[in-house]
Amino acid sequence: DTGVSQNPRHKITKRGQNVTFRCDPISEHNRLYWYRQTLGQGPEFLTYFQNEAQLEKSRLLSDRFSAERPKGSFSTLEIQRTEQGDSAMYLCASSRLRDRGLNTEAFFGQGTRLTVV
Amino acid sequence: QQQVKQSPQSLIVQKGGISIINCAYENTAFDYFPWYQQFPGKGPALLIAIRPDVSEKKEGRFTISFNKSAKQFSLHIMDSQPGDSATYFCAALLSSNTGKLIFGQGTTLQVKP
């Protein structure tokens, strides 16, 4: 499968627990994005990586959220001390930055549905 | 200035009809406008996209119309089918910048048989 892969697909956790999600992008894509989508809304940008460098973080990304992309391959998104308001679909997308500074289309994974109880 | 406004919020169309979804943006620096289709429990899938140097792009039953002066673009689904029932999102990005997508609020389309 050459698409964007996200694991787990679903996660139910108790409030206050830590959770970690993984994203494996399309192999030749050097840009990786995390978005959050709540019910009935469009995805909202959280953060993005170019290779292993995290270059932008949204104000939506509180101190409880941290993302990494070691070696510029897969990425993880960790949420510490989860709150009920963190319940959402967390989407990962990847794209490739071309030589002239233009992006190819972004392809999304299936997402991880987080439910905080 | 970073917003993309999408309408309508929901749409019901008879099979064989034309579905039309509209979007408007403010930031004139946006230079790439994709449409995504999302089924329940799935991630968004790229449907069709346009750059502002063309006024229309057609792929099969899907057409994007782009009006640069009005800062508006729309998706037309011709001969709508029940399998088209999904949520559609317009988006915009600065392709020479971060590649960050700014999404509209989404339109839930139901095509009745």
Image (cartoon, coloured by chain):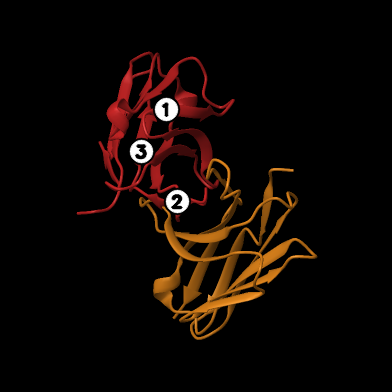
Residue sitting at x 67%, y 66%: B73
Q: Tell me the quarter of the picture where residue B9 sits.
A: bottom right
Q: Which mark is residue A113?
A: 3
**Which of the chains bears the disc numbered 1?**
A
Which one is in front, A31 or B66? A31
Q: Is residue B7 left or right of residue A87?
A: right
The colour of chain B is: orange
Alpha-carbon span between mark 1 and mark 2: 17 Å
Q: Is residue B11 left or right of residue A95?
A: right
Binning the other alpha carbons within 10 Å of mark 2 as few (below 14), some (14 to 19) or many (20 upward) gives: few
Question: Which comes sooner in the sequence, label 2 or label 3?
Answer: 2
Residue sitting at x 49%, y 26%: A85
Query: Label 1 sits on what residue type?
Result: Ala
Q: Supply the letter of whichever chain is red.
A: A
Tell me if label 3 and label 1 are in contact, CB under 8 Å: no
Q: Label 2, on which residue? A: A98
Residue sitting at x 37%, y 34%: A51
Q: Label 1, on which residue? A: A53
Alpha-carbon span between mark 2 and mark 3: 31 Å
Query: Label 3 sits on what residue type?
Result: Arg
Disc 3 on helix, strand or loop?
A: strand
Q: Where residue B56 appears, x then y in whole percent?
A: 62, 76
